[in-house]
Image: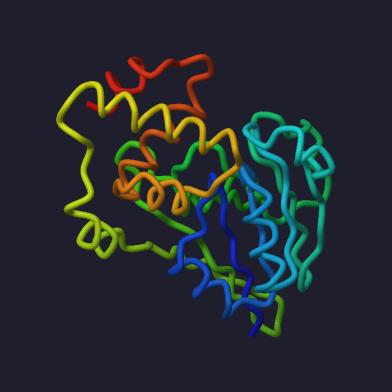
Amino acid sequence: MYRIGVISDTHGLLREEVIKELQSCDIILHGGDIDTKDIIEKLKNIAPFYVVRGNVDKEWAEYLPKMLEIELYGIHIKMIHNRKELPKNLGVTDLIVFGHSHKYTDQMENGIRWLNPGSCGLKRFYYPITMAVIEVMENGRYEIRRIDISHEQHEQKEKNLKMPEKEQDRQKIVKAVMKDVDRGKTVKQIAESNHISLELTEQICRMYLTHPGVDVDGILNRIS
């Protein structure tokens, strides 16, 4: 049996639990919104991988394809970040791997299986942290397993790392996080250097990355 690890929307964060799951896989697929080169380097050390460029993957990721067509263990796969950007003529396709929404999806449409592994990086809204593993049997048949990544362990470790109460200090933290994002630091590095929780860091980073032009007050209003 072969195992294909499927992840997406890491947004600069590759969790230890996700790495552990990927280490048991023969191949890795990433559906885009990688966010930093650091994620690519980490994946290189785990297993052979295929990746497509997401909407937040800017200049550094220009060499990455927006869409890939590959065949793995007899499965014809198309990969793209935003499913709306797929061509109308899909040709021979068994499985489409995509991302963007951060919401786990596994469904059949017109004889094609569509898989969005959700986000295993930054937590968005109330969506769980998820990934998927495709298990391919020797006869060519395959099954897709949803993997839910627990966040309780992180919350327990970080329960004392909260946002300061003073408005001036809160603004200072948000400014520092925004600068660290621009410098290409990972979410974990940002959280540690600013002494705030990983959950709070994820929220600030997400607001900054998904709301172009947002200022400090705008971020504080959204996470309060």
Q: Looking at the figure, which quarter contains the N terminus?
A: bottom right
Depth check, front residue: 56 or 161: 161
The correct choice, above or below, for 157 with respect to 159 in the image is: below
The correct choice, above or below, for 62 with respect to 221 in the image is: below
Q: Residue sitting at 41 percent across and 27 percent down?
A: 175
The percent position of residue 6, horizontal first and vertical second, equals 59, 60
The correct choice, above or below, for 115 with respect to 217 in the image is: below
The correct choice, above or below, for 58 with respect to 96 in the image is: above
The percent position of residue 5, horizontal first and vertical second, equals 59, 67
> In the figure, is residue 147 to the left or right of 200?
right
> In the figure, is residue 142 to the left or right of 128?
right
Depth check, front residue: 153 or 215: 215
Q: Looking at the figure, which quarter contains the C terminus?
A: top left
Depth check, front residue: 59 or 179: 179
> In the figure, is residue 151 to the left or right of 101?
left
The percent position of residue 74, horizontal first and vertical second, equals 78, 70
Q: Quadrant of residue 72?
A: bottom right
Q: Residue sitting at 23 percent across and 49 percent down?
A: 161
Q: Residue sitting at 50 percent across and 52 percent down?
A: 13
